[in-house]
C-alpha cells in the first residue's frame, strides 16, 4: 500500500468531515441565532448572552489540546469518533435547557466534543492531503462550519424557531448529525503514519511557543476567533434591536455572511497555496475590518447590509483556515501536528472564544451593541499585525526559495 491513499478516499473522507464540522457550526453559532428568543425567556443580560457564546469555549480549549495530543499517540479515528457521538448527545440536550445556568452547563459539556473535533479532524486532513492541496482541503473543511453553521444555519435555525419553537431546533440538528456519525464510523480509516515518527510528550507542544512564528500565529488565532465569536454572536441582536429588522430578515442578512464566508474559506486558502499564506491573510484581515466598519456605521437598507456583511464574511472567514490550521500544520514537524493544532487552538479559544464574548457582552451592556462589533474590527487589525512576524510556509514558495538559494 502506498504512503498516500487514493484521491478518492482523500476527497470522500473530506466530505463527511466537512458535514461533521457543519454540525459543530450549527450547535456553536446557532445559540446566537436564537438569542432574540431566549434572552427575554431566560431574563438574561447581554453579559449572560456573552457567557453562553463562551460556554463551549473552556472545555473546547482543553479538549482540543488534549485530544490532539492523544490522537498523535493513539490515532485519529480512535479519538475523533467517540467525541462526535458525545457532541451529538449534547447538541440534542440544548433543547432541554430551562434557564441560563442549565444552558451554560450543557454548552460546557458540548465543548468537549467540539474541541476534539477541531484538532483531530484538521490533523487527519493534513495527513491525507497532498502538501500542494493542504491549504485547499483544510479550507474546505473549515468552510463546513461557515456554510452549514452560519450560511444555511441562519436560515435553518431562524425558520425552525419560528415554525417549531427554539427547543426543537437542536434535537433536529442532532438527529441529522447521527447520519454523518454513522458514515464516519463506516468509512474513516486511520491515516498512515511514518514508522520512524516519535511520540512526543505534551511538553514538546508547549515548547513550540519559543518559535517567534508559532507565537505570532497563536496571537493571530486568538484575534481571529475573537472576531468570529463577536461577529456572529451579537449580529442578530444588533440587526433586530438596533437596525429593527425582523428575525427572518436578520437571518437572511446573516446568511450572506455565511455563504460569502464559505466562498472565502475555499478561494483564499487555494490562492494562498500559490501566492503565500502571509500576504493573503494580511490583505484579507484589513479588508474584513474595513467592510465591517462600514456595516456598523451606516444605517443601510437590507441589500447594502447584506453586501457589507458578506464582504466582511468573505475575507474574515477566508483567513480562518490559513491562520488556525494550515500555517500551524506547516510550521511544525509531523509528529507534533495534532498537539500543535490543539495547543494553538487552546489559547485561541480561551482568549477569543471565552474572554472576548464576555468582554463584548459587557461592552454591549455599557456602550451599546455596536461596541461588541467594534471589538471584532479591532481583532482583525491584530490578525494583520501578527502575520508580519510569521515566516512563509506555503510549500510552493518554500521550494521556490530553496531553489533560488541553491542557484
Image: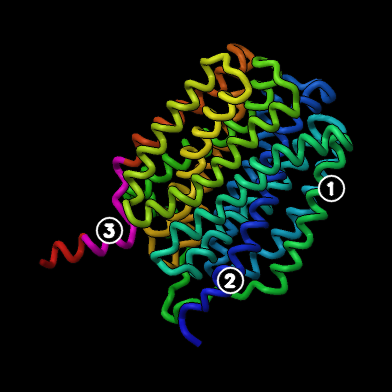
In three-dimensional space, the C-alpha distance between marks 3 and 2, rounded to whole angstroms, equals 31 Å
Give the number of callouts: 3
Instruction: Determine the secondary structure under disc 1.
Output: helix
Frontmost residue, 7 versus 100 = 7
Tag 3 residue: 397
Tag 2 residue: 75
Provide residue 372's location: percent of width, then percent of height. Answer: 57, 22
User: Does the magenta segment cover residue 399?
Assistant: yes
Instruction: Determine the secondary structure under disc 3.
Output: helix
Seen from this angle, which residue lies furthest left?
407
In three-dimensional space, the C-alpha distance between marks 2 and 1, rounded to whole angstroms, equals 30 Å
Q: Which residue is drawn at 58% across and 30% down?
A: 231
In three-dimensional space, the C-alpha distance between marks 1 and 3, rounded to whole angstroms, equals 46 Å
Frontmost residue, 20 versus 300 = 300
Provide residue 19's location: percent of width, then percent of height. Answer: 66, 57
Q: Nearer the viewer, mark 3 or mark 2?
A: 3
Q: Residue at x 46, y 56 (%)?
A: 340
Residue 9 vertical position relative to residue 359 in the rendered view, above or below: below
- Mark 1 Cα shell of 10 Å, populated few (<14), some (14-19), many (≥20): many
Quarter of the rendering containing residue 208:
bottom left
| Span highlighted in magenta in the image | 388-400
Q: Is residue 255 left or right of residue 133?
A: right
Query: Pointers 3 and 2 in contact (CB under 8 A)?
Result: no
Q: Can residue 256 be seen in this view?
A: yes
Residue 282 vertical position relative to residue 392 in the rendered view, above or below: above
Residue 228 vertical position relative to residue 335 in the rendered view, above or below: above
Instruction: Determine the secondary structure under disc 2.
Output: loop
Q: Is residue 359 visible?
A: no
Seen from this angle, which residue lies furthest bottom?
1
Tag 1 residue: 171
Amino acid at each position: 500500500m502506498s504512503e498516500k491513499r487514493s484521491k478518492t478516499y482523500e476527497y470522500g473522507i473530506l466530505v463527511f468531515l466537512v458535514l461533521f464540522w457543519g454540525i459543530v457550526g450549527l450547535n456553536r453559532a446557532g445559540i446566537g441565532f436564537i438569542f432574540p428568543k431566549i434572552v427575554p425567556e431566560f431574563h438574561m443580560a447581554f453579559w449572560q448572552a456573552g457567557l453562553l457564546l463562551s460556554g463551549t469555549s473552556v472545555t473546547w480549549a482543553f479538549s482540543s489540546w488534549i485530544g490532539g495530543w492523544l490522537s498523535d499517540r493513539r490515532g485519529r479515528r480512535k479519538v475523533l469518533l467517540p467525541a462526535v457521538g458525545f457532541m451529538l448527545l449534547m447538541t440534542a440536550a440544548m433543547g432541554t435547557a430551562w434557564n441560563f445556568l442549565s444552558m451554560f452547563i450543557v454548552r460546557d459539556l458540548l465543548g468537549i466534543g467540539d474541541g476534539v473535533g477541531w484538532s483531530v479532524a484538521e490533523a487527519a486532513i493534513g495527513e491525507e492531503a497532498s502538501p500542494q492541496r493542504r491549504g485547499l482541503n483544510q479550507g474546505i473543511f473549515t468552510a463546513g462550519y461557515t456554510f452549514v453553521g452560519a450560511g444555511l444555519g441562519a436560515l435553518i435555525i431562524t425558520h425552525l424557531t419560528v415554525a417549531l419553537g427554539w427547543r426543537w431546533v437542536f434535537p433536529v440538528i442532532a438527529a441529522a448529525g447521527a447520519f454523518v456519525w454513522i458514515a464516519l464510523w463506516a468509512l474513516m480509516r486511520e491515516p498512515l503514519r511514518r514508522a520512524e515518527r516519535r511520540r512526543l510528550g505534551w511538553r514538546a507542544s508547549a515548547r513550540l511557543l519559543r518559535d517567534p512564528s508559532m507565537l505570532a500565529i497563536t496571537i493571530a488565532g486568538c484575534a481571529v476567533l475573537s472576531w468570529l465569536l463577536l461577529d456572529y454572536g451579537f449580529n442578530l441582536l444588533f440587526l433586530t434591536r438596533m437596525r429593527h429588522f425582523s428575525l427572518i430578515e436578520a437571518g437572511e442578512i446573516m446568511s450572506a455572511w455565511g455563504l460569502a464566508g464559505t466562498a472565502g474559506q475555499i478561494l483564499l486558502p487555494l490562492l494562498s497555496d500559490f501566492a503565500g499564506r502571509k500576504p493573503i491573510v494580511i490583505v484579507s484581515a484589513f479588508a474584513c475590518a474595513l467592510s465591517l466598519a462600514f456595516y456598523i456605521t451606516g444605517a443601510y437598507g437590507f441589500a447594502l447590509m447584506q453586501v457589507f456583511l458578506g464582504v466582511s464574511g468573505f475575507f474574515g472567514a477566508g483567513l480562518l483556515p490559513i491562520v488556525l490550521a494550515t500555517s500551524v500544520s506547516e510550521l511544525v514537524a509531523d509528529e507534533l501536528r495534532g498537539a500543535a493544532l490543539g495547543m494553538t487552538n487552546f489559547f485561541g479559544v480561551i482568549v477569543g472564544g471565552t474572554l472576548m464574548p464576555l468582554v463584548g457582552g459587557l461592552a454591549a451592556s455599557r456602550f451599546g451593541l455596536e461596541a461588541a462589533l467594534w471589538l471584532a474590527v479591532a481583532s482583525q487589525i491584530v490578525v494583520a499585525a501578527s502575520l508580519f512576524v510569521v515566516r512563509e510556509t506555503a510549500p510552493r514558495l518554500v521550494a521556490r526559495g530553496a531553489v533560488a538559494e541553491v542557484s
